[in-house]
Amino acid sequence: MKIINKISDFIELRCQISKKIALVPTMGSIHEGHISLVETAKKHGDTVVATIFVNPIQFNNTEDYISYPKNLDKDVANLEKNGVDILFCPSLSEVYPDGFDTTVRVNYLSDCLEGKYRKGHMEGVATIVTKLFNITAPDYAIFGEKDYQQLLLIKSFVKDLNIPVKIIQSKTVRDKEGLAISSRNIKLASNERLFACEIIKSLNKGFEKIISGQKNPEEIINFIREYLSSFDSIKIEYISIRNPYDFEIINEIKEEFVILIAAFVGEVRLIDNVIFLGKNE
Ligand code: PAF
């Protein structure tokens, strides 16, 4: 695996690659979820490029940025073992040199849910991902469904700005208790981990209610809230049921929907979702 730190070096190398490139952008702290993105990338591209960059402008909280788990040596070994061909791993000043003053913003998706509770987060993601697309010029880029709003945001600016990359969405990877794999999970104490598993259980119970006939989103949201209210250390930030394509709030559940949640378990903020894209999914 080639490791590249400089943007100019990557662009030079990119000019020599004629094969299809599949990109897996990450913030490091590589886990099974990322490896599953790499596996998806291998199915689409001939050359798999991964990036590691902990992007400060997508953190709405400096403490969260500073404490974001970092383990570059382990990440390098893990990505290499799993068949990544090129790792792009730039420094902060390489990505945001003095005078950097541009923001990419998708209006609607930057202001609701994650955008509302994490001010500037969505713009931060859109800006770094646009830069990574411009630097690496991938044919495909793989993103996980766990960050569902992020996935829609990326699809949206790729379409609006005519960026020639195909976005591939990859299923959320879960542990055997159903907890979505996330870099933040290592911050959970072992009892908190048990509570964290209740989050997906609550969404699945809500999902079952919809499938068995309850079509009123408010009823489902209240039901999920009530289920989670019995766990003292879970504090819900939002629960929302939306259209999985345009992300509009749904007033009556008909066919496709996504149930999204953000909740704190102790000090750790977790997000998760359940997606239903119709019976023929
Ligand atoms: O999902 C992530 O890990 C990050 O938001 C991303 C897409 C790598 C941008 O920093």
Image (cartoon, grey):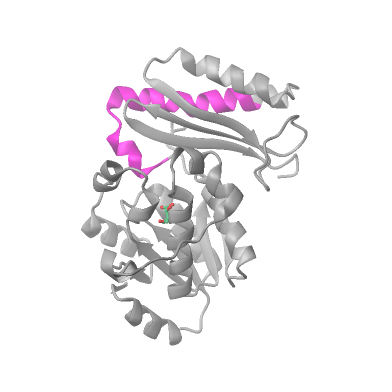
Which quarter of the picture shows residue 188?
top left
The relative height of residue 108 versus residue 41 in the rendered view (above or below) is above
Farthest residue in the right direction?
254
Q: Quadrant of residue 148?
A: top right
**In this rendering, is residue 167 above or below 30?**
below
- Which of the two residues, 267 or 142, is positioned nearer the viewer here? 267
Quadrant in which the C terminus appears: top right
Q: Main secondary structure of the magenta part?
A: helix
Q: Is residue 238 above or below residue 26?
A: above
Image quadrant of ligand 1 equals bottom left
- Residue 219, how many percent across, how many down? 67, 19
Apparent side of residue 8 relative to residue 277 in the rendered image (left or right): left
Towards the viewer: 67 or 88: 67
Residue 8 appears at what percent x and percent y? 34, 81
Number of numbered discs? 0
The N terminus, quarter of image: bottom left
In the rendered image, residue 154 lying in the magenta stretch gets the answer no
The magenta segment is 181-207
Which residue occupies 31% across, 67% down?
89
Residue 191 in picture, x, y percent from top left: 31, 22
Residue at the (52%, 70%) spot, across then down? 45
Res. 93 visible in picture: yes
Q: Residue at x 54, y 19 (%)?
A: 225
Q: Residue 57 or 274: which is nearer the viewer? A: 57
Q: Is residue 103 above or below residue 264?
A: below
- What residue is shown at x 50% (from left), y 72% (from top)? 138
Q: Is residue 135 found left or right of 160 in the rendered image?
A: left
Q: Is residue 171 visible?
A: no
Using the image as rendered, state which of residue 231 and residue 174 is in the foreground. Answer: 231
Residue 147: x %, y % from top left: 50, 46
